[in-house]
Image: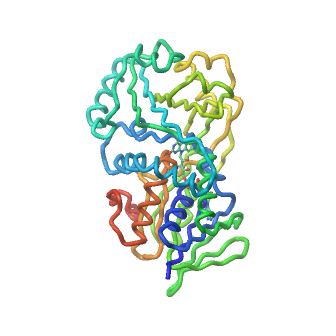
């Protein structure tokens, strides 16, 4: 008989885990207090960019990100097939641009070790970068070209994933209000603010930036806190940009629907997802340094989401010692879209008592306890 699992949280992490578990013969129910994809996952720029994001360390977190990028092509194709809902997956490649000589050295340094994974990556002069990106500023001195990096249109990816979950048999229950997990001597169960209660053989906690709320019940330290990301989009300028263009100040991502996404600021504002003038100005004050045509244009759309950050920047993935039927998958911070397939694979392996696709000791959820 197949084992039952309750997944709490309907962001990209909870949905991905639910999808993969159900495809591996678990019987999954996903509980979401609001709407699936209604928080960070629906707000993301959708970059799948481990090489641009992680330039300092070839640790197991970097390997986790690179492994996930490697899984993405087949993963997104399976989701499209199961959901019958298409979404943009663009293998556009990316340019990580710099303006100063000292930064060129840093880029060369990262290429020396990233080359093993980013086999097609190469340094470009400013002129070579402008051959690929004709609208790029003349001030750009050099760029790292990562042909392997790609992006998805995050809101559509999450919608498709949700539908794929339903089609493969995941029972999704939304608008439950807050879900609480109860661990009593001989039984664990969950209850909802709206009155429902559920029980299963296994529980997976994927509450994103709200993960810290579990600390008291589970008796472990889960230092997860929300980092607000404010982001904006320009209507009709996507055709002026061909790649993800990444810099130390932020990034631009052209989408197939014609919008050019410009992200993202970082600040601490509790659980507020409001957009502030200051937050958007942090983007609009520098973006024309990359693309001068942006100086004259205002974004047509602004929004914000809460990245689930952890104290050391690494996610928390794994089973809890005191509660062996509870697995957490939290704290994916800036890379939850990228990390969705690998997290789903890892949690499925954990529940099947199989070896995980990459080492996970670094992500031990009890490392702060
Ligand atoms: C502006 C911005 C840009 C980003 N760009 C990128 C990018 O380009 N690439 C990338 O890989 N990542 C990006 N990210 C990061 C990415 O969005 C996150 O890492 C990812 O969405 C986290 O997914 P999650 O499922 O853990 O969290 P969420 O999407 O926040 O989902 C958690 C869900 O749990 C629910 N929940 C919480 N508590 C409870 C409870 N007690 N009971 C029931 N449900 C509950 C919430 O309602 C929510 O729906 C970006 C983030 C932001 C904000």
How many marks are shown on the rendered structure?
0
Specify the color scheme. Answer: rainbow
Q: In front here: 7 or 328?
A: 7
Q: Which residue is drawn at 66% across and 48% down?
A: 272
Q: In this view, does 97 lie above or below 67?
A: above
Please give the name of the residue rendered at 59% of the width and 45% of the height, measured from the top-left corner. Answer: 154
From the viewer's perspective, is residue 287 above or below residue 152? above
Q: Which of 65 and 159 is in front in this view?
A: 159
Q: Locate residue 18: give its quadrant.
A: bottom right
Q: Position of residue 60 (x, y in %)?
A: 32, 51
The correct choice, above or below, for 140 with respect to 144 in the image is: above
Position in image of residue 229 (x %, y %)? 58, 41
Percent position of residue 101, x then y: 34, 17
**Is 255 on the left or on the right of 235, as rendered?**
left
Quadrant in the rendering for residue 98: top left
Q: Residue at x 53, y 18 (%)?
A: 289
- Left or right of 224? Residue 194 is right
Asked whether 243 or 201 is in front, the reply is 243
Question: Quadrant where the C terminus lies?
Answer: bottom left
- Considering depth in this image, is 231 or 276 the residue closer to the camera? 231
* Percent of width and height locating residue 163: 64, 58
């Amino acid at each position: 008989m197949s084992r039952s699992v309750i997944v709490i949280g309907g962001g990209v992490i909870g949905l991905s885990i639910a999808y993969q578990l159900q495809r591996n013969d678990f019987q999954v129910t996903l509980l979401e207090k609001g709407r699936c994809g209604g928080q960070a996952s629906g707000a993301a720029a959708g970059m799948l960019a481990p090489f641009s994001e992680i330039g300092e360390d070839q640790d197991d977190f970097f390997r986790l990100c690179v492994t996930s990028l490697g899984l993405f092509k087949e993963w997104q194709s399976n989701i499209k097939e199961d959901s019958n809902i298409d979404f943009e997956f663009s293998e556009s490649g990316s340019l990580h641009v710099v303006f100063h000589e000292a930064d060129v050295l840093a880029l060369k340094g990262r290429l020396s070790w990233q080359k093993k994974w980013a086999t097609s990556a190469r340094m470009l002069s400013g002129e070579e970068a402008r051959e690929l990106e004709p609208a790029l500023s003349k001030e750009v001195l050099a760029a790292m070209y990562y042909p392997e990096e790609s992006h998805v249109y995050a809101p559509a990816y999450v919608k498709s994933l949700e539908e794929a979950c339903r089609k493969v048999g995941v029972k999704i229950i939304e608008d439950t209000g807050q879900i609480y997990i109860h661990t009593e001597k001989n039984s664990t169960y969950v209850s909802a603010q709206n009155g429902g209660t559920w029980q299963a053989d296994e529980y997976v906690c994927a509450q994103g930036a709200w993960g810290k709320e579990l600390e008291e019940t589970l008796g472990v330290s889960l230092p997860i806190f929300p980092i607000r990301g404010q982001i904006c989009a320009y209507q009709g300028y996507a055709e002026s940009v061909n790649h993800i263009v990444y810099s130390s100040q932020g990034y631009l991502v052209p989408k197939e629907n014609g919008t050019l996404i410009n992200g993202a600021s970082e600040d601490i504002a509790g659980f507020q997802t409001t957009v502030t003038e200051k937050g958007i100005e942090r983007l609009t004050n520098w973006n024309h340094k990359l693309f001068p045509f942006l100086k004259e244009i205002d974004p047509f759309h602004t929004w914000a989401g809460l990245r689930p950050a952890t104290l050391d920047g690494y996610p928390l993935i794994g089973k809890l010692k005191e509660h062996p039927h509870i697995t957490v998958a939290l704290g994916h911070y800036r890379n939850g879209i990228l990390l969705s397939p690998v997290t789903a694979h890892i949690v499925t392996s954990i529940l099947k008592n199989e070896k995980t696709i990459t080492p996970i000791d670094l992500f031990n959820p009890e490392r702060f306890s």
